[in-house]
Amino acid sequence: MSRTKVVPIPVLGRHHINAYLLLGRRPVIVDAGTPGSGRAILARVTGHGVDPADVALIVITHGHIDHFGSAAELHRLTGAPLAGHVADLGPYRSGRVREPYLPTGPMGRLMARNRKLHARAEPFEPAVLVDGETSLDDFGLAARIMPTPGHTAGSVSVLTDDGDLVAGDLVANSFMGLIPGRPADPPFHDDPRQNLASLREMLALNPTRLHVGHGSALDPDRVRRWAEREHDRLARLATAGRLTARGE
């Protein structure tokens, strides 16, 4: 079987917000950007020689506005079914993220004031409900949807048989992608410790690259080193009683 090609689709800036096009026997789109970006995403997809009618599936990695904002629009433009995890059905069905956002640092506290993050997207109902590891063979892709909770309860990643991990907001590049190649937390996590556990589970599968929602692709070894430092940082915060998570 030929290698699955992972193509970044810039939604904002060069890598500030990314969707992805996965090219296998049939094309699959991962994430749908912010509200109103569906046609721009589709233009990028068709620019890679893909007929919109051939798109087999649109996978939404989690229920934040910059990842599911144009899901309903992309569904209408392509006819492709949408896939999302059952734990994030609330945002998908309401078009609103769960609030408050829980910042991971100063950037998150600043971004939480941005009105666009509190906007309402067009709601949608996933036709493919994810509640565990899910093969994408039936959609023409040698890959699996992997639940990776922590950033949100229903966060997922897509792992190709070639080892590419399309990781959503499991990890990011520093400053929302402005410093390429340098792993960092995204601005928000519902549960930082659970997210780190999910990241370590994915790293244990020895991915070749991590393709993230914010920034360029990351080297797994560099992410492993960062994850060790992040584990120590979170342990210190927990000991000091300064670590919170949704539901605590």
Image (cartoon, rainbow, N blue to C red):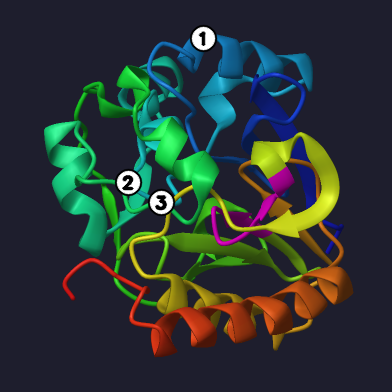
User: Residue type at mark 3?
Assistant: Pro
Residue 158 appearing in the image:
yes
In the depicted view, which residue is nearer to us: 151 or 81?
A: 151
In the rendered image, residue 206, in percent from the top left (x then y), is placed at 78, 82
- Specify which label sits upstream in the sequence, 1 or 2: 1
Q: Quadrant of residue 15?
A: top right
Q: Is residue 208 left or right of residue 92?
A: right
Give the alpha-carbon distance from disc 3 to disc 2, as whole Å.
16 Å
Residue 57 appearing in the image:
no
Q: Quadrant of the N terminus?
A: bottom right
User: Residue type at mark 2?
Assistant: Gly
Question: Residue tagged by mark 1?
Answer: 39
- Specify which label sits upstream in the sequence, 3 or 1: 1
Looking at the rendering, the stretch of residues picked out in magenta corresponds to 166-174
* Element assignment for label 1: helix
Question: Residue tagged by mark 3?
Answer: 103
Magenta span contains residue 113: no
Residue count near mark 1 (Cα–Cα under 10 Å), binned few <14, some 14–19, many ≥20: few
